[in-house]
Amino acid sequence: MARIGVFVCWCGSNIAGTVDVKKVAEEVSKLPYVVYSTDYKYMCSDPGQNMIKEAIKEHRLTGVVVSACSPRMHEVTFRRTVQEEGVNPYMMEMANIREHCSWVHDDMEEATEKAIELVRMAVAKAVELEPMEKIEVPVTKRALVIGGGIAGIQAALDIADGGVEVILVEKSPSIGGKMSQLDETFPTLDCSQCILTPKMVDAAQHPNIKIYSYAELEELDGFIGNFQARIRQKARSVDMELCNGCGDCWNKCPQKKIPSEFEAGMSDRAAIYVPFPQAIPNTPVIDRENCIYFQSGKCGVCAKICPTGAISYDQSDEFITEEVGAVVVATGYDLFNTDVIGEYGYGEIPDVISGLQFERLSSASGPTEGKIVRPSDGKKPEEVAFICCVGSRDDKYGRPYCSRICCMYTAKHAILLHHKSHGSQAYVFYIDVRAGGKGYEEFLRRATEEEGAIYMRGRVSRLYRDNGKVVVKGADTLSGAQIELHCDMVVLANGITASPGAEELARKLSISYDEYGFYSEAHPKLRPVETNTAGIYLAGCCQAPKDIPDSVSQASAAASKVLALFSGDFLTREPNIAEVNPFTCTGCFTCREVCPYDAIDEEEVTVHIDGKKVTRTIARVNLGKCQGCGICCAVCRSNAINLKGTKDLQIFRQIKAFTGSEKEKSDEPVGSKK
Amino acid sequence: MKWEIKTEDIHTSFRDEVEELSGESFGACYQCGKCSAGCPIAFAMDHGPTKIMRFCQLGMEDEVINSDTPWLCASCQACTTRCPREIDIAEVMDALRIIAKRRGIKPRTDPDIALFAEIFLSNLRWFGRIYELGLVGEFNLLSGRFFKDFGKAPAMFLKRKLALLPSNPFKWGKVREIFKKCEKMKEGEGRE
């Protein structure tokens, strides 16, 4: 016979302020099967837990009801407590009298009455609880990293260094991401490519890393520890084995008027191209939309000229399936499209350029070899204005958030301008300068104190062209003055937006995202690299705007989560999942139709019915996939599938306890759907 | 200009009054200055719109009420259109003019600005659309500057910028109804 102990928590004044806990403990002690009940200030504290342990010993309790906060808070705590005293952890039931009662009510009398009802229901369920054991699922010790920017590369390297195989999938023809396009990086003015390319080479040469470039994730199936990733290898039209990267094809390609993505449109590329000289892999791709051969059927110069015969026009997309145990999403960001801000005239005024275009202008490997000139006439700009918060902190364009990098990269631009274009004057229009990182404030002061940048506190209202100059209509709110500058060039500090296609990928991965398309972490403070989907982790700007140091840190954090996941051969999971009764299952498989996790398998069973052997096909629950949502239980017409931990009988006992129909001592659930 | 702000200055009802009248919230303003940067009248103002917004945030009633900025505002709405926090600054200026009028404060640069605003509204109320000739005539008459801008009239007539008669008299009443309804709503009756 069940022997239940009830423990009522005060939670300081959180519960005791509204609920008469003493009365609750006294009332529930009269319930059948309850052999002990008490109350205490903080049940979750050490003395509180010891009270439970003592009571289990003294009163030989078989089940425990803790009437306290939400099970989301302390279910694990109290399960461990009873387990330590030799009681099965799943014989502990919580009655939530805080969130569901004391926090939402004012009237002490009524709240106390409700608390008693809640505990009475929990006791009724506790009587019917059954011991359960945790489930062990095998783990595939391979990881998938989506995105080959600095975050993806760092995560892949860290996981690979931990001895685990990594599949790195990159959408564009080369890994490297946005960081490969930058000139120097704040606050140390390290050359971005000089610190990035060694990491790219490391990743390419690492025995544990397999890179799929120019590839995208098509589909992700499975569950934590056991994912199947279907990857689309887009047709490069170039054989990676044969190509030796000599460059004849892109030099001879007649179609050379395509704005280069890598150069942010500051120069052109051919239809067959590698994005930049240090690209990994150094195999070109044919941009079929702009290739003369693919558009008109004529040309074929690259195939004729290729010394190794690597050009393959009839290549088509291939699909590869990889088995992995964990996924790191590091898909990065995109720059805010400044075209939409009409008053800044980006795209119409040639000397208004984006932050990334300035990076390319300033980069020694860029189209001007590091010479800063203005796009309209190639002359050295004397007066240059930099405008911060373009597409950041701007409700009007749906971007109320701070992009976190623009203040610092603008300070860097001002410094670079001073270094590379002697005698030029930088004006920085800002609202607030956010220089919160290590060495950032010092870097900012260097821009104003040593490099002569003039900072003006005000947002620019309008840019227009006048006599070959760009007129900047701004303000300085500190002096209250309206400002009109005639500049040679204006650089817009574009903010960060979610990468295009971020939402589509989120749906493939079943992870959630916020209203701006950034992926949601499981907890904003305490679980910053995990998603709500077990086994999928986040790194870099796909989660929120961040700079390089933060992206790298988050990538390493995600890698450590993956390695921790892979540290054992099995994963343990909570046993609250669906269970099929083989005697009543008719094998109709309606459950399989509705299951969102694809967790219903088929099983052949032999049963004895009326002395005859009958072999039937029935449903079986996949222990790894089932998430315990319970939809199958709702649709099962023979009531053969049940959710462990919240079985029909347990629920109906609770309902009975609440509706007061305890008099009916029948074991049959009242109002059963049968 | 006040150089010292004390707790009691901040806890005045002025900010609430302007917020209620304009329907805008001063908490949204982060003082970026874009309104002042683009204001075509800012050169003539004693304080730019950004400063006015700041004064309102701090409840600095005297500075706001005695500033000519709201009176000089041309309601071109460049500020409203470009405000990154989507504050209707032109509406705030309107509210400030109403408050100044309630307090009987006249613009310092030219007291006739207030007169013009009044004539403009009554003209609109009467004719449904602005009847320029009537507007100018009434303004010149009441301000005592009888021949102000007189020389410009012939050229404007020729370019059809000035009509001799007001617009369709059969539709005059429509705008009057709108005015009446608004007044009724303000009194708190018949709000829909």
Image (tube, helix red, strand yellow):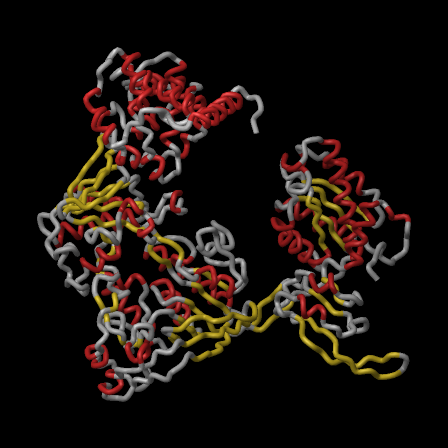
Residue A199: x percent and y percent? 30, 68
Establish if B165 lies above or below A433. above
Q: Is residue A133 visible?
A: yes
Residue depicted at x 27% and y 70%: A275
Residue A127: name its quadrant.
Answer: bottom right
Left or right: residue A444 versus residue A605 is left
Residue depicted at x 27% and y 33%: B39
Q: Quadrant of the C terminus of chain A?
A: bottom right
The count of marks equals 0
Residue depicted at x 24% and y 41%: A429
Q: Nearer the viewer, residue A605 or A208?
A: A605
Q: Nearer the viewer, residue A233 or A115?
A: A233
Residue A337: x percent and y percent? 33, 54
Q: Nearer the viewer, residue A261 or B100?
A: B100
Residue A340: x percent and y percent? 33, 50
Q: Is residue A244 visible?
A: no
Q: Quadrant of the N terminus of chain A?
A: bottom right
Establish if A25 lies above or below A576. above
